[in-house]
Image: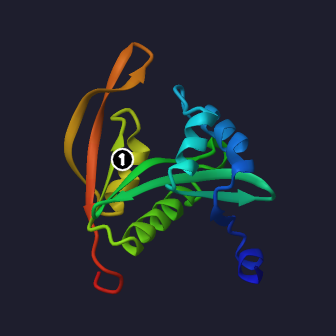
Amino acid sequence: MVAILKSGLPEMRPLRLEDVAAVAAVEARAYEFPWSEGIFRDCLRAGYNCWVLVREQAVIGYGVLSVAAGEAHVLNVCVAPEAQGEGHGRRLMRRLMDLARWHGAERIFLEVRPSNPRAMQLYHTLGFNEIGRRPNYYPARNGREDAIVMALELLPPGSE
């Protein structure tokens, strides 16, 4: 706890059921087509790795990771609009990547909107590469938007 106070970094901890409303509120501020509280509750029930960043008792970011059959999938990662640009997205992604390794995943996948260049840049700097597209994947104001599929081959800890 002393390191958190000295560094000023928000606390990172597993998502709890009582956090769902706050997480959904961040999601609604950040995205035009947000996940519902029910989706976040379903992720907890399914046993997905769900983490939050908390600063001064307020949720400012979260990530959701699914791991199965040697593969991991980043299902959602978000930082509150007022906290973006402070490195929290990178910190959340690194936690999800570490969790994927810990669970024995050999690769990690994610989808990102082409209209989200900041996220795409973050993923590229973390070593993700575009491997394909999913046509009409996301809802969009004028219909549907493709998803860029990205992947990262995970190396065991210490071999990078």
Answer with left or right where residue 103 lies relative to residue 53: left
Q: Which x, y percent locates residue 154?
A: 28, 70
Image quarter (top left, top right, bottom left or bottom right) of the N terminus: bottom right
Q: Secondary structure at mark 1?
A: helix
Quadrant of residue 143 within the rendered picture:
top left
Crowd class of label 1 (few under 14; some 14 to 19; many from 20; radius 10 Å): many
Q: Which x, y percent locates residue 13?
A: 65, 65
Q: Which x, y percent locates residue 60?
A: 67, 51
Nearest the eye: 48 or 129: 48
Judged from this view, the residue extending furthest toward the left is 131
Residue pictured at 55% horizontal, 31% vertical: 34
Answer with left or right where residue 59 lies relative to residue 33: right
Judged from this view, the residue extending furthest toward the top is 142
Q: Which residue is mark 1?
A: 120
Protein image colouring? rainbow
Image quarter (top left, top right, bottom left or bottom right) of the C terminus: bottom left
Nearest the eye: 91 or 156: 156
Q: Is residue 137 above or below residue 9?
A: above
Answer with left or right where residue 39 lies relative to residue 144: right
Judged from this view, the residue extending furthest toward the bottom is 158
Q: Which x, y percent locates residue 120?
A: 36, 47
Residue pictured at 53% horizontal, 47% vertical: 43
Residue pictured at 38% horizontal, 59% vertical: 67
Q: Is residue 22 above or below residue 103?
A: above
Residue pictured at 65% horizontal, 59% vertical: 53
Judged from this view, the residue extending furthest toward the right is 56
**How many labels were placed on the picture?**
1
Of the residues shown, which amino acid type is indicated by label 1? Answer: Met
